[in-house]
Amino acid sequence: MKSMKKKSLMLICFTVLFSVVLMGCDTDPNSPRGFSLPKGNAEKGKLVFLKYQCLSCHQLAGVTQQGIVDNTELSIKLGGNSTTVETYADLVTSIINPSHKFAKGYPLAMIQDNGKSKMKIFNDVMTVGELVDLVTFLQPQYTLVPYRHTNYQFYGY
């Protein structure tokens, strides 16, 4: 019984310590706390998508553009069904820092050179307003589908 109380006390102490550490991270200068962008306009976002010729390296169902230079070796699919949520923050980060995370399911040689994304960095050409509108346009293009667990058959003994 004494061992059980000691374990419970240790668990409580660990939980309190962990909570204090997490709260401390919130005051770090690099904390994302308070970061928020204004609401965007999806219609304007589609125009931004076309303006920067995103279809030259990406595919997006239902969106086409005449006269675009097509880099078929970089045809990365955007939108569609996903078992993970593409959050607003994920999309913003992928646009402003494309080397942060690479597209899954594509050979690395296809999407990067020397560990860096082949995607052009738009930080010096795209306005914040355009970024907000673009992300507002892209986010609803993803549909969250539940992860399907494998149903294992029970083999009784």
Image (cartoon, helix red, strand yellow):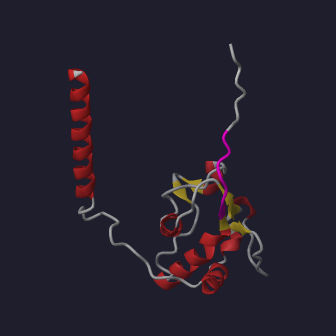
Dominant SS type (magenta): loop
Assess whether residue 90 is covered by the magenta stretch.
no
Q: Is residue 9 left or right of residue 141?
A: left
Assess whether residue 148 is covered by the magenta stretch.
yes
Position in image of residue 113 (x %, y %): 56, 55
Q: Say which of 150 and 95 sits in front.
A: 150
Position in image of residue 41 (x %, y %): 57, 85
Q: Residue furthest front?
A: 1
Q: Is residue 55 above or below residue 23?
A: below
At x 24%, y 61%, the residue is 28
Position in image of residue 94 (x %, y %): 52, 64
Q: Is residue 20 left or right of residue 89?
A: left
Q: Magenta segment range?
A: 143-149
At x 25%, y 65%, the residue is 29
Image quadrant for the C terminus? top right
Q: Is residue 156 above or below residue 35?
A: above
Position in image of residue 17 (x %, y %): 22, 45
Q: Is residue 115 above or below residue 93?
A: above
At x 56%, y 69%, the residue is 120
Q: Say which of 71 and 9 sits in front.
A: 9
Q: Is residue 111 above or below residue 67?
A: above
Image quadrant for the N terminus? top left
Q: Is residue 64 left or right of residue 105?
A: right
At x 48%, y 69%, the residue is 96
Q: Say which of 90 and 127 sits in front.
A: 90
